[in-house]
Amino acid sequence: MRALTGIEPDRWEEERRRGISIDLGFAHLELDKDIRVGFIDVPGHERFVKNMLAGAGGIDIVLLVIGADESIKPQTREHFDICRLLGIRHGLVVLTKADLVDPDIVELVKLEADDFVKGSFLEGAPIIAVSSKTGEGLDALRRELSALARRISEKNVEGYLRLPVDRSFSMKGFGAVVTGTLVAGRVSVEQEVEVQPGGRRLRVRGVQVHGSAAKQARAGQRTALNLAGIETSDVGRGMTLVEAGSFEAATLIDCEIELLSSAKPLKHRAPAHFHAWTAETEAQVRLLEREVLQPGASAPARLVLKDPVQLLPGDRFIIRMFSPVVTIGGGTVVDIAPPERLKRVDAAARITRLSKSGPEDRAVTLVRESKFGLGISAVIARTAFTKAQLDAVTKTARLVSLNGPEPWLVDAEWFAARQQKIHDTCAAFHRQNPLLPGVPREEVRSRELNGAPQFLLDAMLSQSKTVVAEGEHLRLKSHQLHLKQDEEAALGKIEKAFEEAGLAVPALAEVLAKCGVEAARSRSLLQILFRQRKLFRISEDLVYHHSAIETLKQMLAAHKGERFAVPTFKDWTGVSRKYAIPLLEFLDRERITRRDGDDRIVL
């Protein structure tokens, strides 16, 4: 690596003394004006494979290094298996130390390497012999790297920020610094980011790309971030920096798992070491279709992680045997928050279906599985879909977007069925209670949306073509009050009784008893007059006509600013204390008067 880039990747004295890589090393190379390649030098020794795994997740190209003096070693096979399991699709084979063996041996090792990569993504890839001492082959390697780099697709710059941390350290005068390969999105100076797991939010004080200061880093670049408000000990390898408020770490994942043909059979509920991006934890492998997974086979599975890891659908992972610790397989994450109470066979079918789903089908599935739909942030957290992608889904009429604290997605069929039920509930109520304004809002909520977010009913009503909310009641838009002849007459009698009474009103029960209809209908007619604001209820037993209240307000307006006591009010109105006290309390509530001790002031 040093001979190729001029940068020493071994950071530790022990590595230089022993002549082997122990941890990840980093370097970069300008191949052309428009191409810069970042290198992650991973340790080759079998004891440090877990460190190798921390650096392998974000790479686009693998340089499979084989010593010409040693040929293919067991750790080479394990490293290559890991690259295949991680879905890497591009690379070169590099034979190092070509100066230490005869040319015939180099050709023999080339043949062995060619046979080794047959049937893999490296079949037919260039095999280049190099020497760090003589410089042999390095120019050819640079040319092949340049040609290969131009064929690599750019990572998802427009996606959400994800930076798996592979190193953290402290710099004097700067504080905490973390590094990693930016696998998606962008990150800029002064941006707020979030550490997962944990959710702690931090500010980016500075950005470096391949060792040089920058205002912004983009997906695919080796990135160092200087973070404010955190100690180095609080963030490190295995954590991920994400866009604030976007993602959460998972401890239960559904996945497609693949077992290497060289592995031993894997039993249901077997423990394993789990590696994804830079994270490492323990996992229990729950097979969903069988009790034992045979070597070389693949199957849907559920992994229970000991520690939370920030993951998304499509992420690749590696599993290693618990003891002895060797790589046995890997897989692809399908869902990071699966339903927990599914039968094994149903969970397996769900994984198979989701693994074949596009963005639209996946979003629809997640929303349908939630009883009352999902907020757009929850869908994004489980899929990393952009808002534009989700907008496209709602345009297909399979999901409906509702207004709430955030845009809320519900299944279109569920939405239509629930709207119809609310309509039917109102229609039935109107048939049974023709004189009442409508069904109480809370009754509808508890019956049709019990347990739903509070805003959901109002959001649904805003898109209803047939139901409208009036105060605390719901009614059909088409509903009109139709009184029978005796009800029309009774309504007039009730209003007239209070209108003629002025401020010395009769007892409510007496008026209702004389109106000409039975008690239940008379009470409903009274409610109509209240809704029409022709009558006002002052207390439980006292009801006044609006004309009497207006006359009282006009009389008090002539005394604006005056202080008065109860006797004075009785003189002004001509009413007894029985009526004066409830009226004054009503006026206080209406802010027409204000009590001050035993007196009141006209406002």
Image: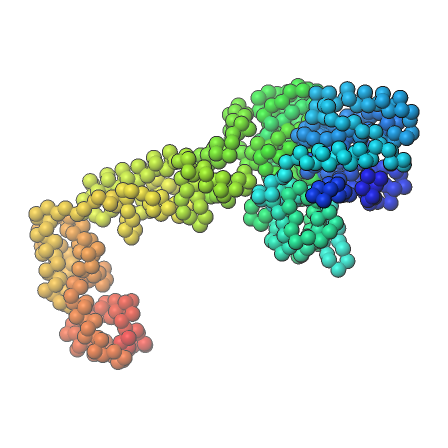
438 left or right of 26? left
Residue 350 position within the rendered picture, expressed as x and y whole percent measured from the top left: 52, 27
The answer to which quarter of the image holds residue 572 is bottom left
Q: What's the residue at 62%, 22% (across, down)?
A: 298
Give the colouring mode of the picture.
Answer: rainbow
Q: Is 280 or 331 nearer to us in this picture?
A: 331
| Residue 400 visible in rendering | yes
Residue 232 visible at all: no
Q: Nearer the viewer, residue 223 or 142?
A: 142
Q: Check the picture and name the quadrant holding the N terminus.
A: top right
Q: Where is residue 304 drawn, in percent x and y?
A: 62, 33
How far across and how far down the image is residue 414, in percent? 38, 35
Task: Please give the name of the residue rendered at 43% of the width and 41% of the height, measured from the top-left corner.
Answer: 409
Residue placed at 73% from the left, 51% from the top?
212
Q: As drawn, is 526 to the left or to the right of 206?
A: left
Q: Residue at x 17, y 56 (%)?
A: 529
Q: Quadrant of residue 259?
A: top right
Query: For this view, does 215 lie left or right of residue 247?
Result: right
Instruction: Find residue 282 and report its horizontal and vertical position in percent.
Output: 68, 35
